[in-house]
Image: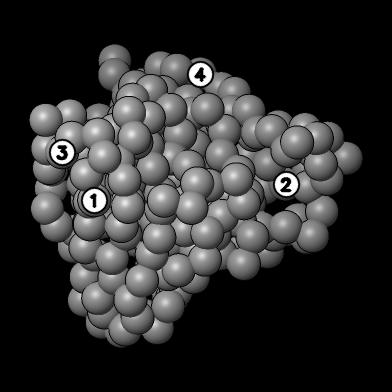
């Protein structure tokens, strides 16, 4: 299953509302994860099952969608949120990732 | 707090076998699935495969028969062997724990370069 994220990169300011989209090449129900990755670090799980917040993740992060269309929203961008975000489907094997969306400071 | 740590050579010659071990601390390896995932600029994030603590495995078909994973519960470790490597296998290799398919715990990553 191919996962396609958009945009590939975006520039935003602290306090902005940011939305990243992820499309699956076939339906995956809600079997979708979102990860955040900072340079030189491992990906960090933010959202699982499309909309469930991983423990310890700030509530400004939210996920939505089902089927083939999914979103990750950051309600008010904070300095520590500048990173690359990946979606991952775990509906069928092999699990596959999107190509990533880099969130940069405007 | 569960922690994972990859270990192994950072340089492997073409056609040889890449071998990495992941040591789990702060929790038992039992009753979980454990994964290997790699990341390179050209291929992005790629799931290599998973192993259950009992030894059941599931590999990415894209890697064919080159992959073998094993688990050693007495040492709280699991391992990856990737045979016949080429430059395309150069990547950062991560180990991770899977909870219902979601990888909430990751190692810090082991950079591996394939070069003569």
Q: Nearer the viewer, mark 3 or mark 2?
A: 3
In the rendered view, does B84 fall on the left or right side of B18? left
Q: Say which residue label 3 marks.
A: A12
The residue under the point 65% across, 33% down is B4
In the displayed structure image, the side of residue B14 where residue A56 appears, left or right: right
- Residue on which disc 1 sits: A17
Q: Which of B14 and A98 is in front in this view?
A: A98
Q: Distance between the residues labelled 4 and 2?
A: 19 Å
Which chain does the residue under circle 1 lie in?
A
Element carrying mark 3? strand
Which comes before the other along the chain, label 4 or label 2? Answer: 4
Image location (x, y in percent) of residue B86? 28, 34
**Contact check, label 1 and label 4, Cβ < 8 Å:** no
Q: In this view, does A92 lie to the left or right of B106?
A: left
Q: Is mark 1 on a helix, strand or loop?
A: loop
Q: In this view, does A54 lie above or below B56?
A: above
Please state which of residues B73 and B25 is positioned toward the viewer in this rendering: B25
**Residue lying farthest front?**
A15
Does label 3 lie on the same chain as label 1? yes
Residue named by callout 4: B9
- Residue that appears at 59% across and 23% down: B7
Of the numbered discs in the image, which one, if any, rests on residue B71? 2
The percent position of residue B6, horizontal first and vertical second, equals 59, 28
Q: Distance between the residues labelled 1 and 4?
A: 43 Å
Label 2 – label 1 distance at C-alpha: 44 Å
Q: Quadrant of the C terminus of chain B?
A: top left
Residue B47 in percent (x, y) is at 42, 53
Residue at the image point whose x is 57% and y is 33% from the top:
B107
Q: In this view, does B11 lie above or below A66?
A: above
* Chain of the residue where label 4 is placed in the rendered structure: B
């Amino acid at each position: 299953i191919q996962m396609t994220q958009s945009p590939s990169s975006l520039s935003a300011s602290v306090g902005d509302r940011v939305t990243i989209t992820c499309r699956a090449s076939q339906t995956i129900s809600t079997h979708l994860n979102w990860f955040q990755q900072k340079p030189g670090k491992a990906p960090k799980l933010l959202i699982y099952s499309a909309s469930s917040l991983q423990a310890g993740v700030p509530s400004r992060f939210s996920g939505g969608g089902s089927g083939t269309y999914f979103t990750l929203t950051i309600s008010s961008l904070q300095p520590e949120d500048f990173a690359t975000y990946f979606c991952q489907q775990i509906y069928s094997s092999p699990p596959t990732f999107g190509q990533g969306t880099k969130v940069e400071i405007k | 707090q569960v922690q994972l740590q990859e270990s192994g050579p950072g340089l492997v010659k073409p056609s040889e076998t890449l071998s990495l071990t992941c040591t789990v601390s702060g929790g038992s390896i039992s009753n979980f699935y454990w994964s290997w995932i790699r990341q390179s600029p050209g291929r992005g994030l790629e799931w290599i495969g998973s192993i259950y603590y009992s030894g059941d495995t599931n590999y990415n078909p894209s890697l064919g028969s080159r992959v073998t994973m094993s688990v050693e519960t007495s040492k709280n470790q699991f391992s990856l062997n990737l045979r016949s490597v080429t430059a395309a296998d150069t990547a950062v290799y991560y180990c991770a724990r899977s909870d219902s398919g979601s990888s909430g715990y990751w190692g810090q990553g082991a950079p591996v370069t394939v070069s003569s």
